[in-house]
Image (cartoon, grey):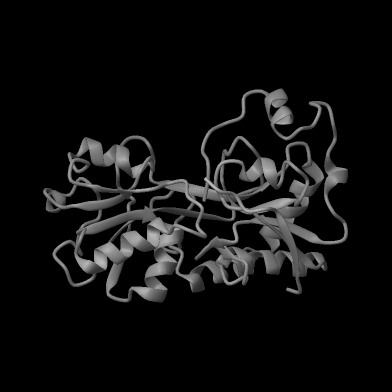
């Protein structure tokens, strides 16, 4: 897969799961001795963000994504200029950006990601089912609903909902879409929603922070249904954090403080974008019991 040459530009203004078991492995992955204190690697002159240049609705080089807006908010709170290092969110992303000290934070990273040290999470979201709002599947709330029997679902290959689809016998007719791609050249989520609009699939199963904003912006006839009641593993909801280098504990604490003090503003950005927000346990839409 082609990778972009690292390019850094200044501005005025989700995704691995797992758990780290050996500090030494993390240190080697980032090219630092296990005992090193890396806080001094963080720039004091700019808020340096690692981001994908073509990953809407999350981020792009025009800084139109909701993660770009969150980065702008944090930069403003720090009183620092915002500076990006752009690289495709694919294999090698962390190693070539955060690990190479080209930048100091990844704005959106799944809690438990072993390649980074996570901040406190700043939102919780879930995988969703996207269906025509006026269609026969508009009342479906889980993949085990009998109404989905015989339906052709779009699914990102290797994503957690695929396991549940196997359990319910939905995978045989499913249409797969690629997981790890260079978004400058391929857009699986947009293609899946276009296929739904064209009637080539009956429903789309996507990560909510991608599906929600895309539907809000470009597919007003669709309904986004968070999958809150799936039983068993893998779970359908995940907490999203900011990722920093292992060992940079002062930097992590500073970001945690900024997240806590600005949670309301962060929520407003996410809600405006159309991201489906859940409570911390993933059992209800944010603000509902």
Q: Residue at x 76, y 32 (%)?
A: 31
Q: Residue at x 59, y 49 (%)?
A: 3
In this rendered view, identify the residue nearer to me: 204 or 124.
Answer: 204
Task: Give the quadrant of residue 112.
Answer: top right
Quarter of the image for residue 83 reads bottom right
Q: Is residue 13 left or right of 190 when viewed as pictured?
A: right
Q: Is residue 31 above or below residue 47?
A: above
Vertical side of 133 occupied by 113: above or below? above
Q: Residue at x 44, y 60 (%)?
A: 210
Q: Is residue 262 left or right of residue 176?
A: right
x, y (%) of residue 219?
33, 73
Q: Is residue 131 visible?
A: no
User: x%, y% of residue 266?
Assistant: 60, 66
Total numbered labels placed on residues in the image: 0
Q: Is residue 156 visible?
A: yes
Which residue is at 28% across, 40% downward? 164
Horizontal side of 170 relative to 219 (left or right) equals: left
């Amino acid at each position: 897969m082609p990778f972009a040459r690292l390019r850094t530009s200044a501005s005025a203004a989700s995704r691995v799961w797992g758990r780290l078991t050996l500090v030494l492995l993390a240190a080697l992955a980032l090219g630092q001795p296990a005992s090193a204190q890396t806080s001094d690697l963080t720039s004091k002159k700019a808020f340096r963000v690692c981001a994908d240049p073509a990953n809407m609705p999350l981020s792009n080089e025009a800084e139109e994504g909701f993660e770009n807006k969150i980065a702008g908010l944090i930069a403003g709170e720090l009183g620092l200029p915002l500076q990006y290092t752009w690289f495709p969110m694919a294999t090698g992303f962390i190693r070539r950006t955060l690990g190479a000290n080209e930048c100091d934070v990844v704005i959106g990273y799944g809690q438990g990601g072993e390649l980074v040290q996570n901040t406190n999470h700043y939102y919780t979201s879930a995988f969703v089912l996207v269906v025509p709002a006026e269609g026969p599947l508009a009342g479906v709330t889980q993949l085990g609903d009998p109404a989905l029997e015989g339906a052709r679902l779009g699914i990102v290959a290797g994503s957690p909902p695929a396991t549940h689809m196997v359990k319910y016998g939905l995978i045989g007719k499913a249409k797969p879409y690629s997981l790890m791609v260079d978004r400058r050249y391929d857009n699986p989520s947009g293609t899946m929603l276009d296929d739904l609009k064209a009637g080539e699939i009956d429903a789309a199963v996507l990560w909510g922070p991608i599906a929600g904003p895309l539907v809000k912006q470009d597919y007003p006839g669709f309904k986004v249904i968070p999958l809150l009641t799936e039983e068993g593993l893998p779970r359908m909801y995940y907490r999203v954090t900011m990722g920093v280098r292992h060992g940079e504990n002062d930097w992590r604490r500073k970001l945690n403080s900024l997240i806590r003090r600005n949670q309301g503003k962060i929520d407003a950005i996410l809600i405006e974008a159309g991201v489906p927000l859940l409570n911390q346990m993933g059992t209800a839409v944010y603000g509902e019991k």
